[in-house]
Image (cartoon, helix red, strand yellow):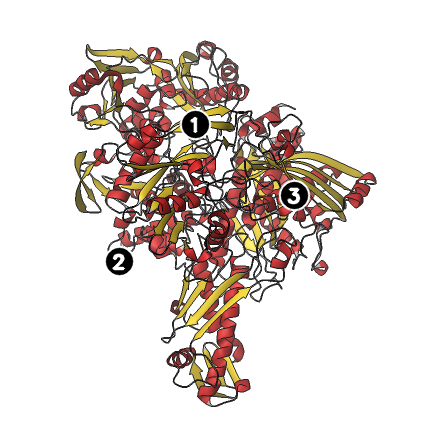
Amino acid sequence: MTAETELKPRYIGQSMKRREDPQLITGKGNYIDDIKLAGMLHVALVRSPYAHATIKSIDASKALAHPGVVAVFTGDDMMDINPLPCAWAAGRVKNNVNTPRALAVGTVRHVGEAVAMVLADDRYIARDAADMVDVEYDPLPVVVDAKEATAPGAPQLHENAPNNIVMEWDAGDKAATDAAFASAEVTISEPIINQRLIPTPMETRGSITRYDEATGEFTVWMTSQAPHVMRLLLTAFVFGIPETKLRCISPNVGGGFGQKIFCYNDMAFTMWASRKLARPVKFVEDRAENYKASTHGRDHITDAEICGTKDGMISGLRVKTYANLGGYLSTIAPGIPTTLYGRIISGVYKIPSAYCHVTGVYTNTAMVDAYRGAGRPEASYLIERMIDRFATEIGMDPAEVRRKNFIQPEDFPYQNGLGMLPYDSGNYEPALNKALEMAGYADFRKAQAEARANGTYLGIGISSYVEVCGVAPSAWIGLAGEGWGAGLFESANVRVHLTGKVAVTTGSLPHGQGLETTFAQVVADELGVPYDDVQIQWGDTQGTPFGYGTYGSRSLTVGGTAIKKSVDKIKEKAKKLAAHMLEANEADIVFENGTAYVKGSPDKVKTIGEIALQASVAYSLPEGMEPFLDETSYYDPPNCTFPFGTHISIVEVDPDTGMVDLKRYIAVDDCGNQINPLVVEGQIHGGIVQGIAQALYERAVYNEDGQLLSGTLMDYAIPTAEMSPHIETDHTVTPSPVNPLGVKGAGEAGTIASAQCVMNAVIDALSPFGVKHMQMPASPERVWKAVHSK
Amino acid sequence: MIPSAFEYFAPASVAEAISLLEQYGDEAKILAGGHSLLPAMKLRLASPGVLIDINKIAELRGVVINGSINIGAMTTWHTIEHHDGLKSACGVLPEVVAQIGDIQVRNRGTLGGALAHADPAADAPAAILALDAQIRTHGPGGERTIAAGDFFTDMLTTSLEPNELITAIIVNKLGAGEGAAYAKFPHPASRYAIVGVAAYVKMNGDKVSACRVAVTGAGPMPTRQGDTEQAMLNSDGSAEAIAKAAEEAGANMDVLGDIHASEDYRRAMVKVYARRALTTAVARARR
Amino acid sequence: MTTITVTVNGKPYTRDVEPRTLLVHFLRENLNLTGTHIGCDTSQCGACVVHLNGVSVKSCTTLAVQCDGAEVTTIEGLADGAILHPLQEGFWEKHGLQCGYCTPGMIMAAADLLKNNPNPSDDEIRHGLEGNLCRCTGYENIVRAVRYAAEKMNTVNAD
């Protein structure tokens, strides 16, 4: 046998079934609401029915008298803890940060803001008693639209934020961009609205706190994508207690999509009340509460301009965006429409000059923060719509315009001039070509023309995207750079026990992404041990090394690399120990496939199990070597990764009703090397349908009084199986040079690619009616009006 | 999401249910399939003090087809949807019912419950109007029969007396020369009708000799479309005749707008779906 | 309080409940069968689907008192001991779940679907799951999972 066949990965690259699944398919999962503690109290909240009001008085006497009610607390009771922190001061946000308190004090600024908490022995009683709390409000004027909120005379939300402005931020070269527009042959401007969405993980959010009076320690179970960060924020910022006094545990989390990254008031008020009452306290939202009071996503109002030559070369992009951030700043809200949006608005194109200005705005709406893709879907939608607009204007095939302006393979690492880190690697044209071929693009226009002659309106849409993933480099994203108030490394500890079984603890954690499986595949191959011998543990700040959590398609690129680094350290130590055990020089030891042998004498061999046993019993170790194979790594990558691809969709529009039938959806993605193609494909599928949903169905709507009209799943349409297309997938592989696994991340790609893919198709279908742009969602009414307003 | 507390009764007979209604008056609500009432109670939009669950009343369930079709008020959507006899006697009913809610809703929801609730966007009321069904009720004063056309009086309001119960719905079988159809524009989230149009057509040779068209979803209550029906009558049922008649649909009714569909758009869709329903109904009548 | 007896996954349970107790809360809180989930307030999401006397229902829109004397099957009762139901197997094989929250309801709805239509087309599978929402998978692999189960069940039945 040759070294080559020997070293061939056994698990990496395999579509392995997920090890997470057996418990989840049998109903044995452990989600937040499944957790019951002895003596646990249940919380029901009294929430504001007004979008903006002064709280005049709160009378809880009736509720307190209700049998089974233990206590009622208001914001005034909790003045001994601080407001929730905002951890990403992007865009030079300084003196106008306003974040929510655990419960409102004095003023409410959006419908559903929590005003009082009722604690009872039973959730039914708590709910009944919440209705008995009398709150008197003095309503104030309301503004819900980001652009209107900055206008003179608009209602003001916070004294320290004149005109409701959170921050003014820009990126790129304004003078050069203005000059490009001044001299351009073709200039196009288009108002582009990226509507507000509600993330809607199927499990709502919640938290349970148990306070231990004897030790003064809190344990909080939380639906969190980032328990270590929550521990830091809740102790150091909200409670002013040592970090060591809080243990945060994420059990099974029923989807996050960004909404579960953040520090929420329920974490703070369950902690506060549990300490006060010396009983465990549980709060779990219902869906209406999740819709009114947990974070939303997107909500941009943009003026976009693009310019170029008649032969299809783009020369400039100029963008002005109002980003609605809601009534307060959520944990990382300012960073989303700035670093993760403005710095990548030029997409996959080599645009000589680009400029983006973003105004972040307070309004009387729920807080807006990261939602799957977080800034990048907004950027990708904008540029891909404008590329199509440009193509239409100059009468060129949109595929051709893309091809002509793509960043070329030799341009990498590529600086886009907007302050983004250099794009790591890419090869955009093969992905485009593959997608065009799958779609039968060459023949489509003929079929489209024939169909039109028969009164059938078909359209095709292309979306070539790039995203920033594996979001990290602390030196770049941190306070000195992009304003993130911490680092963004990841961590892993790997231990090989004396039985040869491997226990891995990670700072990142899965809530659907299959990381347990993927991580185990990496460890098994890198260490050369059976996959089933590897256990991946996560989610508990007690027992896992500090990590920043799972979001931004970063868990494999950053967290996976931390695991690999720990395994490398284990292997180094194992080689030293093997040399000692085999009485050979360390330099002569080869470690592969879970064994260490002497170069040239493969019979002189020790398995990792034998080495681990010796390391554990420690009867005979080399001089100065500590017992046990136990290594921890913190990995802070030198760059982000930049996955890319091209998606194509084909739609048919019914001109009588405006209904859009999504007939085909084709996705060619490049996320670098794939550890588990089954899991990657699943991530792509799910992401795509969330983007399609933005294009066709979803829209969070506030009326002018700040009432959320899309406040239940009867009003807010997330797609069913019937509303979702069959998805045809393929991929190209351009490994990332940033990390040793060559991976780029796949969690958000689908969402970043798909909304504009469908919108471009819808607008293409409507081109006979003179339609050049349409805002999302392309609801039947919007499409019908576009057809009939000709 | 938790309902307020209530007292619960599960009578075994219609008489018992009515005496409970008399006893508790306004406090009481009838629980049929529960798929409108229970969500409303969970959202605390309804908080009845007494719930009278009529699911245990066996006499209210089932479909009997003799000279006409008698559908017990508590017959579930599922039963109607999959009833072979109904498919041949009045195929439009299973067709309408298959478009209600989802499978689990149809496993619990009932025809009588839906009619009594009279949701302005429910599907069945349009069919009931277009089929000119009879609604049999039982109250303290005994039985009576209400014509479908007299049943829906306003948004969420019917001509049912406070202590009255729907016991059955009586529908005529569709014979030779008769056809009916339902065309629906479903709400993408709730699956209720943004616009739903049910049409019934009788052809006498080449002429339309009877026509009933009813619209749901668009306005505050399901509404017959007299102008469309008149335009169809004595026409040849051709595509042109249908298109002309459908243009009249919605003209004389209140139409509502909301975040999903404006009034203008709904009015336009009433015409489109009237045309679609009539086209299918005529084709079936000619078959 | 009303005393009810409900047979859940083959085992009878007698409990005192408030009439307003929702079946889903009865299962989760009174019987500790937490595999049945709650995802919405309005009967849209289907995370709570169980079988009541053999048909799929949304247990968030059913009162526990209405189930007195009835038989309920939940996700915990679907497998035959250690042998997974073909649908459970299919969801595992085909990566039909990610976060797993919708999965119990999805599987229970799919079981009802296959009972009524043992050989559904992909479109029929999609239609048959109209009462269940999944936010993770985009449904593509759920369709594959149900198809896998249908094929497996048909093979077994043919044997």
Q: Is residue A507 above or below residue A687?
A: below
Name which residue type carries label 2: Ala
Helix, strand or loop under label 3: helix
- Badge 1 is on which residue? A57
Q: Residue at left 23%, top 32%?
A: C19
A681 displayed left or right of B105: right
A381 displayed left or right of B94: right
Name which residue type carries label 3: Glu
Chain of the residue under the numbered disc 1 shown in the image? A
- Badge 3 is on which residue? A384
- Badge 2 is on which residue? C82
Q: Residue at left 50%, top 44%?
A: A84
Chain of the residue under the numbered disc 3 shown in the image? A
| Residue B114 percent location from the top left of the image | 32, 23
Q: Which of marks 2 and 1 is in front?
A: 1
Name which residue type carries label 1: Ser
